[in-house]
Amino acid sequence: MQINPTISKRHMWTVMALLCSGYMIAYFDRINISVAVASPDFKQFFGLTDVDRGALNSAFFWSYAVLQIPAGWLVDRYGVKWPYAGGFFVWSVLSGATAWSTKLSQLLTIRVCLGVGESMITPAGMRWIRLNVPESRRGLMIGLYMAAAKLGPGVGAFIATYLLLHSGWRNMFLILGFGGLLWLVPWVALVRDDDREREKAIVKEAGPQSQVSLWRIMKSPIMIGTVIGTFCYQYFVYYCMTWLPSYFKEQRNLPLDQMGMFTTFSFLGMAVVATAAGYAADRLIERGGNPVRVRKTFIIAGFLTASTEIIGAYAESQSVALFFAVFSLSGLGLMTANYWALTQTLLPGAAIGRIVGVQNCAANLPGIVAPLLTGWLKQTTGSYEAPMQAIWLFLLAGIGAYVFLVREKYVPKGA
């Protein structure tokens, strides 16, 4: 299948740069609350318990996860450019407005509404990549896109910590939120609004066999396994995004500046590995490797490497614990680009926004579960060992889903 022969390499890389930078900014506005709830001043001002902190870290995903499928429909119906721009504007303004909060209820409301604005980001980005990037480059492009999602919390934790220490939590939210609006200028000026026409051409070229109903896709073992595996992968990511700063400070006794630094190292490592693994898988496929087998190998290797986090949970040595905190999350990057690319390889391309919406809904439900379950387990047991045991069990379940359910023989066929 020929992918958008009219797009130049320069324009493709320009849009990818905008998509990646937009994703990073989105994660700045997610990680800022995780940094804030680790601050004694912020906790004292709002009178936060561990359960309150878990709720604050989770609230964003109450709307974000639920709206993934509607967001996928929206970008399928109206294209990528304008829905994305509208969502970006909404979430940036809300993030900045957090600075004026005075009550926990206000914080929770803003975080829920922030999830509404950001719901466009993954369905829109994945749809653009699917319609404009060939299979032989898709692993690299998705790797870069997902690496931006890991660089976002990594760089964002560093910036947010710096701003918190030097300007206070209110200025941190103002700068990170309203500053992001500058991104909209190049997006509106440079991105074309032509992906709906491109999708029609792809469907016509593929023929009737590509017309598979969304219901048939949803009930296939591949989609079920992908949903389970995606949930398990993201559970670990969202634990790290929402509780890792507090873990470093409270369990490993790191000062605030080192807390931000090690959080940054963890996500930067994941970003580097995600990009490298996507590129490596592309090269193996280009040399004749079976795309499904190659990408599944990277996925399972990522799950196995990530499961070493359990070693850090029981380590008495601080240096060992910090090593495995960084190593396990970085290793999970082996699967980051490949599990998204595998979905696009195995499932039909029509209505890709909705398919991505379903997968990203599964990817963000743990954004609700992980902060709440972690907060409850920590408050109940008094340590981070039980939350990290839960992560390990989810990682093992993810391996099982990809081994037994996400198989080429289960690819749904057209009527």
Image (cartoon, helix red, strand yellow):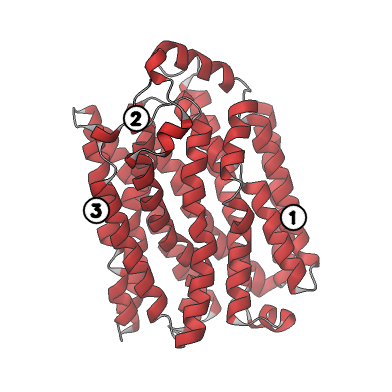
Residue 94's label in the rendered image is 1
Query: Looking at the rendering, which quadrant does residue 320 occupy?
Result: bottom left
Whole-Å distance between the Cαs marked 3 and 1? 38 Å
Q: At x 32% / y 68%, what residue is drawn?
A: 392
Q: For mark 2, does the 10 Å Cα neighbourhood hold few (<14), some (14 to 19), or many (20 or more) residues? A: many
At label 3, which amino acid type do we have? Ala
- Residue farthest left in this picture: 288
Comes first in the chain, label 2 or label 1: 1
Q: At x 51% / y 28%, what residue is drawn?
A: 351
Q: At x 63% / y 76%, what residue is drawn?
A: 52
- 208 on left or right of 22: left
Q: Is residue 361 above or below residue 193?
A: below
Whole-Å distance between the Cαs marked 2 and 1? 41 Å
Q: Is residue 333 above or below residue 208?
A: below
Disc number lying in front (2 or 1): 2
Residue 377: x and y in percent read 47, 79
Residue 412's label in the rendered image is 2
Is residue 363 visible in this depiction of the protein?
yes
What secondary structure is found at the residue carrying circle 2? loop
Determine contact: label 3, label 1, CB under 8 Å.
no
- 205 on left or right of 40: left
At label 1, which amino acid type do we have? Leu
Residue 50's label in the rendered image is none
Residue 121: x and y in percent read 58, 42
- Reading the image, the residue beneath label 3 is 301
Quadrant of the image for the N terminus?
top left
Q: For mark 3, does the 10 Å Cα neighbourhood hold few (<14), some (14 to 19), or many (20 or more) residues? A: some
At label 2, which amino acid type do we have? Pro
